[in-house]
Image (tube, coloured by chain):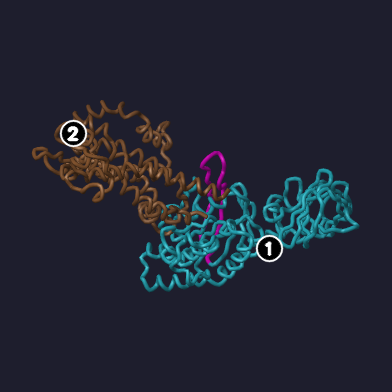
Amino acid sequence: MEKLYKFLKYTFIILWTVFIVAPFLWAISTSFKDFQSVNSKVTYIPWLDFEPTLEGWRVLVKSPARGGVDIVEPYFNSLFVTCTASLISIVLGTLAAYALSRFTFKAGFVRNNDITFFFISQRIMPPIVLSIPFFIFLSTIGLLDSLIGLVVVYIVLLMPIAVWIMVDFFNRVPKELDETALIDGCNPYQAFYKVVLPNSIPGLIVAGMFCIIFGWIDFFFAFILTFTEVQLLPVKVVALNSSITPWWSLSASALISVAPLIIVAFVVERYLSKGNLSGALK
Amino acid sequence: MNLIGENITYKPDDQFHLNDVSFNFKKGNLYTILGRTLSGKTTFLKTIAGLLNPDSGNLSFEDNDFIKIPVWERNVAMVYQQFINYPHLNVYDNIIFPLKQRKISEDQIKKDVEEALKTVGLVGFENRKIQELSGGQQQRVALARSLAKKAKILLLDEPLVNLDYKLREQLREEFKRIFTQGLSEDTILIYSTTDPQEVMELNGEVIVLDEGKVLQKGPAKEIFENPRTLKVAEISNDPPMNILKGTKSSEKLNFENILIKSPPHFKNLSDQSYNFGIRASEIKLDNQGEEFEIELAEISGSETLLHLKKGESNVIALIEEVMNFKIHEKVKIKFNENKLYAFDQNEELVSSPYGVSHG
């Protein structure tokens, strides 16, 4: 029984891994092919089946005038917008979450839970509901088709995630930890950054990861809030046309688009398994 | 120069957490707060620490108005019942945390930490992570941090309650040693607990707290010998003191149709109804005694606790050996009448085997 279970378990894991990894391998191998290797016959293994070439990757960095597609600028645009918006969302979101977790607010009928729900409700709405208000808002303040405008919009989208994750995280950090810091001579600000924050790194990493992922993959707002001046990577990649851009370049662009997410996932996985708060309570 | 509280009241919702509490704590003394769960012990300590501000009343220390001083400037130390340490720091850094906050010189810090580690018996654990320590060791770190700080007010909130039985016994012994040797004459030590035995062993000044109200103050011995009310008698004994409703008529006491000779210390009591109190340890198995039915028998350590019933009366007897009983079995017990307490209908103590020392 034990052996059968183990056998089934590993069979499933292996099959699933193949299912997930195969497209990547296929894309990687295609991205190093040239016209000959793609169109003549079925080939898989570089050097053995075909001669690898960097032609597909070179197209990505060449300007359109020279027959390339130039995704370098959209790539850095996307990196800038995602990282800036994530960073600001995490900083503001963490502060908001700490306040919501530790202090009691009363304003009319509004309580802490209402404020938390207000943040989260921004994510409950379908994004399309926000598209027109955002469009009008950005055009009014003259930030349509600009990086700063996109950063502002992405903060609205990402901060609720940060608040949501961090409120939940801080609620699980015992209040006695803050109190002990106060008793040990920290003022409330010192208690926050000397004691609470260092113990919140796992939460910050999770929140950061979600912000980066949701920021990086957003297509909708990047599509409707930009025209010609600024282009983000998802929009650019979608615009690539297989009848103009060759397959090997499409594979390369797909790979380079998901690369940051894969790196984020690996880094985060290491941190998550290491850090925990078990020593704080009991 | 003392820590003085006057009429402190704290009522955050419709219940009193502290109700008109007054006290005068002198330096170099140990005070224990005895009370059941939710009796206001933690609120009491947090008020002194400054984590809570009372709704009314005064709190002063060394002739300063303590309420105006924020927590982080009060120079108090507190050990919680949960083992609260800084999980991101190792043992050494945990202990020096409050010292660094107060900008004490490196040499002094080193000396203080060494001393504190020695006192709590954690020498050699300096570089361990908090998560690698057992519960008892974690609580020692918390205590070491409080001791190294050399605070003038040291608060311990049920520090042993989350430990297992054996460790609790061991640490309680050590606490006694630490409190008698390791503390300076400048320190006021306030220790809260639900466990009457801890109170007796620590042998300090006791404050009995219930529903935020001070029921009785005095030395541990006094609380044990002369609990002023029925409630104090219940709180300050574990198992709680047995209370039997009965009457005294001439030289006999009568409860549940059991007749007992009135003890000498009852001779001044008038003939009327009383609540008689007797400790579980003053009830003995005796073939000449009264028949009771066993409802429950629990063995704890080297003792057996018998929950007995006769008519409407329930009593708990503490037998000082391990014996096996069957439930619903009948046993005969005898009450030691020389250790009987009498409380009047207002639940106030009127006669005790040790003589009532108050009016």
Which residue range is magenta in the image? B2-27
Please tell me how many numbered marks the rendered image carries.
2
Residue A277 screen position, x and y as percent: 45, 53
Q: Nearer the viewer, residue B99 or A228?
A: A228
Residue B40 visible in this rendered orientation of the protein: yes
Amino acid type, callout 2? Leu
Chain A, colour shown: brown
Residue A148 screen position, x and y as percent: 20, 38
Q: Quadrant of residue B96?
A: bottom left
Instruction: Report whether A125 appears left or right of A8.
Output: left
Q: Please, which residue is most extreme toward the right here?
A: B288
Q: Quadrant of residue A20?
A: top left
Q: Nearer the viewer, residue B143 or B123?
A: B123
State the quadrant of the C terminus of chain B. bottom right
Judging by the rendered image, the residue that carries numbered circle 1 is B221
Chain B, colour shown: cyan
- Are there few (<14), some (14-19), or many (20+) residues within 10 Å of tag 2? some
Instruction: Report whether B263 appears left or right of A79.
Output: right
Q: Residue at x 57, y 47 (%)?
A: B19
The answer to whether B89 is drawn above or below residue A170 in the figure is: below
Residue A236 screen position, x and y as percent: 20, 36
Residue A278, which numbered label? none
Q: Residue at x 84, y 60 (%)?
A: B264
- Foreground mark, 2 or 1, reads 2
Chain hosting mark 2: A
Amino acid type, callout 1? Lys
Q: Please, which residue is most extreme toward the front here?
A: A41
Residue A143, which numbered label? 2
Q: Please, which residue is most extreme toward the left here?
A: A65
Chain hosting mark 1: B
Residue A95 visible in this rendered orientation of the protein: no
Q: Secondary structure at mark 2?
A: loop
